[in-house]
Image (cartoon, rainbow, N blue to C red):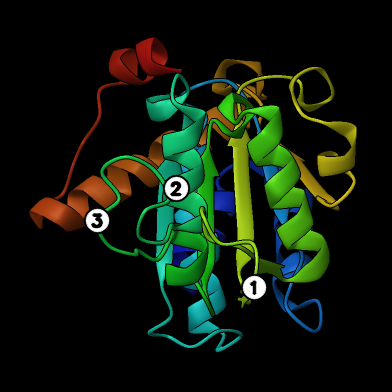
Amino acid sequence: CSSDLTNFIGAQGSMRQIIKQVSAAIVYPPNGLNILITGHSGVGKSYLASKIDKFAKSQKVIDPNSPYMVLNCADYANNPELVSSMLFGYVKGAYTGADEEKAGLLEQADGGYLFLDEVHRLSNENQEKLFSFIYSGQFYRMGDNAHPIKAKVRLILATTENPEDVLLTTFLRRIPVRLVLSDFISRPLDERLELLRYLFYQEAKAINKKIKVNKYVVSALV
């Protein structure tokens, strides 16, 4: 998986600096640095996040069996309370229908990574709670303000928006590494050609066949 990450980044020349930032963030003591990835839909934010997790495991920075949890905040943007219960968990009786206690994603991701896609859809209250967790390394389940829970979780956040416009300043201050993935069409031609070559190479491996690509197909794709 480390070679997969290198190939993915290497296929996009403008991203060579990004891999240096990612590598530094992964190994930074004692528990890595939180990462924010910005870029339009389809540029590879989720893919890069998953490769960061696999790279960290392959380098034994985190345990190979550590969890990788994912939440798309846009799926629940209209229900901040539900998002809060999913992130931080809840105790019995915390709200109507909470018949038993349940661990949240932060607790489940202890020792590994939590990827929050479309993080700009988090409510201000949940951003504040997440900021508090980043600052202190502990959080409270919904309905319980007396028993803090500690967890070591590496955060990867992604957004299609300008972070300064959609995220609280206090929250942003706790995200030291910010990566910008540019659209493919805005990258130099040689980078797009190299990326196409990599994608066809991956497909050839998957079907165990050689692939010959007509130059007109390549022209259309770039």
Q: Name the residue under label 1.
A: 148
Of badges 3 and 2, the one in the foreground is 3
Q: How crowded is mark 2: few (under 14 residues within 10 Å), some or many (20 or more)?
A: many
Q: Residues within 10 Å of mark 1 (few under 14, many from 20)?
A: few
Real-space CA distance between mark 1 and mark 2, rounded to the nearest whole angstrom: 15 Å
Residue closest to the eye, 1 or 162: 162
- The picture places residue 64, in percent across and down from the top left corner, at 42, 85
Type of amino acid under label 2 = Ser
Quadrant showing the N terminus? bottom left
Does 184 appear above or below 178?
Answer: above
Q: Which of marks 1 and 2 is nearer the N terminus?
A: 2
Which disc, if any, is residue 85? Answer: 2
Q: Which of 62 and 4 is in front in this view?
A: 62
Q: Which of marks 3 and 1 is in front?
A: 3
- Residue at the image point whose x is 47% and y is 23% from the top: 77
Q: Which residue is drawn at 36% across and 21% down?
A: 218
Which amino acid type is shown beneath numbered disc 1? Pro
For label 3, the residue is 99
Q: Earlier in the sequence, mark 3 or mark 2?
A: 2
Residue 3, x across and y down, in percent: 48, 69
* Residue type highlighted by circle 3: Asp
